[in-house]
Image: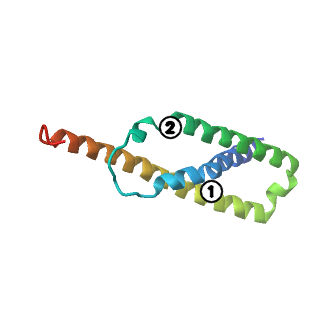
Amino acid sequence: MRLKALLWSSCISAAMVVSAIPAVAAAAHECPAGKVTAASYTHDFKSEASTIFQEVQSDAQDAILFGDAHQQALWLAPYRTNLDNLYTEAKSLTRSAGNAVELSSVSKEYRNLRHNLEPKGSS
C-alpha cells in the first residue's frame, strides 16, 4: 500500500512540475534591464499564479485518471525509465526555478541600492 501511495504522489508531483515548465522556463531567461514603466507596477502576478496553479491541478487530476486506467502499465520498464527521466528533469527544473527566484531577489536588491545611492534630485 505504501508503494502505491508513493507512486501516486510521484505521478502527481511530476504532473505539477511538468505543467509548470513553460512558466518557469520563461522566468529563467535573462533579459536586459530597461526603464521601469507603469506596466511594471500593474502586472497581475496573483492572477497569473492562480492560472498556473489551476492548470497544475487539472494536470494532476489527469495524471490520477490515467494512473487508474493503466495500473498494470505503471510497472513496465519503459514507464519506469520515463519516470526516472521525469524525476531528473524535475530536479533540474527545481534548481532553475530557485536560480530564477534568487536572480529576481538580487535584481530587486540591486535596484533598491541603486535608488538609495542616487544623489538627490538627479532622477
Task: Tell me what residue is drawn at x 50 percent, y 37 percent.
Answer: 45
| Along the line of sight, the residue nearer the viewer: 122 or 78 | 122
Q: In terms of sequence position, does the residue under pointer 2 or pointer 1 come before the other?
A: 2
Q: In the image, is 9 to the left or to the right of 119? A: right
Local crowd size for mark 1, using a 10 Å CA cut-off: few (<14), some (14–19), many (≥20): some
Task: Tell me what residue is drawn at x 36 percent, y 44 percent.
Answer: 105
Position of residue 54 relative to residue 11, above or below, is above
Quadrant (top left, top right, bottom left, bottom right) of the C terminus: top left
Residue underneath mark 1? 87
User: Based on the displayed image, in which of its 4 quarters is residue 22 positioned?
Assistant: bottom right
Residue underneath mark 2? 45
Residue 95 in view of the camera: no
x then y, percent, for residue 56: 66, 42
Task: Tell me what residue is drawn at x 82 percent, y 48 percent.
Answer: 66
Circles 2, 1 touching at the beta carbon (< 8 Å)? no
x then y, percent, for residue 42: 44, 35
Secondary structure of the residue carrying numbered label 2: helix
Position of residue 19 relative to residue 86, above or below, is above
x then y, percent, for residue 116: 19, 39
How many labels, in total?
2
Query: What's the amino acid at mark 2?
Result: Phe
